[in-house]
Image (spheres, rainbow, N blue to C red):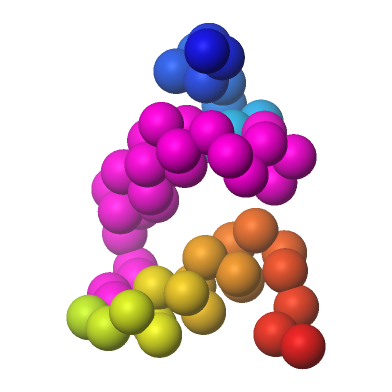
Amino acid sequence: MSNYLNLSYQELKEYIKTHPQDEDAFQYFLKQMRTKPGVVVSTGEQIETELKKRLGISNE
């Protein structure tokens, strides 16, 4: 288990890119992302698009 709770938002973002199997860290990242103002998503497609944008993943 990683100590992702002590990572900065940017460090956590990088961590989940390189450790996609760490579901707990990913869920924690989602929780952190939801606390950021300015983005409202209501569908699965919107959350997927927003996650890709925030993680720097292209929509190819």
Asked whether, in this view, residue 15 is left or right of residue 39, the answer is: right
Q: In this orientation, does residue 14 appear?
A: no
Say whether residue 47 is magenta.
Answer: no
Q: Residue at x 45, y 38 (%)?
A: 23
Say whether residue 19 is magenta.
Answer: yes
Asked whether, in this view, residue 52 is left or right of residue 27, the answer is: right
Q: Residue at x 30, y 53 (%)?
A: 34
Q: Quadrant of residue 38?
A: bottom left
Q: Residue at x 44, y 18 (%)?
A: 5
For residue 12, above or below residue 40: above
Q: In this orientation, does residue 52 appear?
A: yes
Majority SS type along the magenta span: helix
Q: Quadrant of the C terminus?
A: bottom right
For residue 40, above or below residue 24: below
Asked whether, in this view, residue 8 is left or right of residue 37, the answer is: right
Q: Position of residue 57 (x, y in %)?
A: 72, 69
Q: Position of residue 51 (x, y in %)?
A: 52, 65
Q: Residue at x 38, y 49 (%)?
A: 30
Q: Quadrant of residue 7?
A: top right
Asked whether, in this view, residue 15 is left or right of residue 21, the answer is: right
Count of numbered circles in the view: 0
Q: Nearer the viewer, residue 32 or 1?
A: 1
Q: Quadrant of residue 14?
A: top right
Q: Position of residue 6 (x, y in %)?
A: 50, 13
The region drawn magenta spans 14-41
Q: In the orientation shown, which residue stands out farthest toward the front?
A: 21
For residue 38, above or below residue 43: above
